[in-house]
């Protein structure tokens, strides 16, 4: 999904597609020895957690709960960017996949940040 194809507009679908790409990358990294395997486990946890928290936010019991889940998703996105940068810089991810996924994680983080800000603004108007 990441790359040439158009990106889903819905944040739930976009984070799901991103998590799927993370799973695919981690399958490859897990087959390597040493740091790549360890880093892939960290990446798998944070990269798949983004969408899980976005999904969970949809069933938030309150606006505060909704914002809290999105804040967690934002933290996970930022952590994911870190692991992808580290994998790329350490040359454990040599085919450009980490850079592409890092860019997508950055876009997702900006969208999530915007959702948080707009939700907070909306609650102040009431």
Image: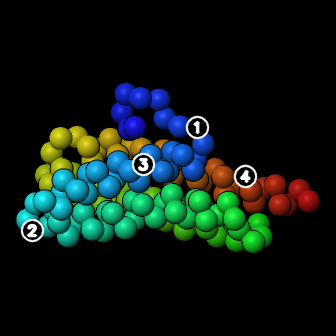
Marks 3 and 2 sit apart, C-alpha to C-alpha, by: 25 Å
Asked whether the viewer can see residue 111, the reply is no
Q: Earlier in the sequence, mark 1 or mark 2?
A: 1
Q: Earlier in the sequence, mark 1 or mark 4?
A: 1
Give the mark toward the camera: 1 or 4: 1
Q: x, y percentage for residue 106?
A: 44, 48
Judging depth in this view, the residue of 16 and 80 nearest the camera is 16
Q: Earlier in the sequence, mark 3 or mark 1?
A: 1
Q: Earlier in the sequence, mark 4 or mark 3?
A: 3
Mark 3 Cα within 10 Å, few/some/many (few <14, many 20+)?
A: many
Q: Which residue is painted at 26% across and 43% down in the image?
A: 97
SS at circle 2: loop
Q: Mark 4 and mark 2 in contact? Answer it, CB < 8 Å.
A: no
Q: x, y percentage for residue 112?
A: 58, 53
Q: Which residue is mark 2?
A: 34
Q: Which residue is mark 1?
A: 9
SS at circle 4: helix
Marks 4 and 3 sit apart, C-alpha to C-alpha, by: 23 Å
Marks 1 and 4 sit apart, C-alpha to C-alpha, by: 17 Å
Left or right position of 90 against 55: left
Asked whether the viewer can see residue 17, the reply is yes
Q: Which residue is mark 3?
A: 18
Give the mark toward the camera: 4 or 3: 3
Q: Which residue is mark 4?
A: 118
Position of the N terminus by quadrant? top left
Q: Which residue is painted at 71% across and 68% down in the image?
A: 60
Q: Which residue is painted at 64% across and 70% down in the image?
A: 68
Does residue 63 lie above or below 89 as drawn? below
Position of the C terminus by quadrant? bottom right
Marks 3 and 1 sit apart, C-alpha to C-alpha, by: 13 Å
The quarter holding residue 86 reads: bottom left
């Amino acid at each position: 999904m990441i790359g040439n194809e158009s990106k889903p507009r819905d944040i739930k679908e976009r984070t799901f597609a991103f998590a799927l790409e993370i799973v695919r990358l981690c399958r490859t990294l897990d087959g390597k020895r040493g740091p790549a395997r360890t880093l892939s486990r960290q990446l798998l946890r944070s990269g798949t957690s983004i969408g899980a928290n976005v999904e969970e936010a949809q069933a938030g019991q309150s606006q505060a709960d909704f914002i809290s889940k999105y804040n967690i998703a934002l933290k996970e996105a930022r952590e994911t960017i870190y692991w992808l940068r580290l994998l790329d810089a350490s040359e454990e991810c040599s085919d450009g996949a980490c850079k592409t996924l890092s860019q997508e994680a950055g876009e997702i983080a900006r969208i999530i940040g915007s959702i948080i800000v707009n939700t907070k603004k909306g609650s102040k108007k009431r």
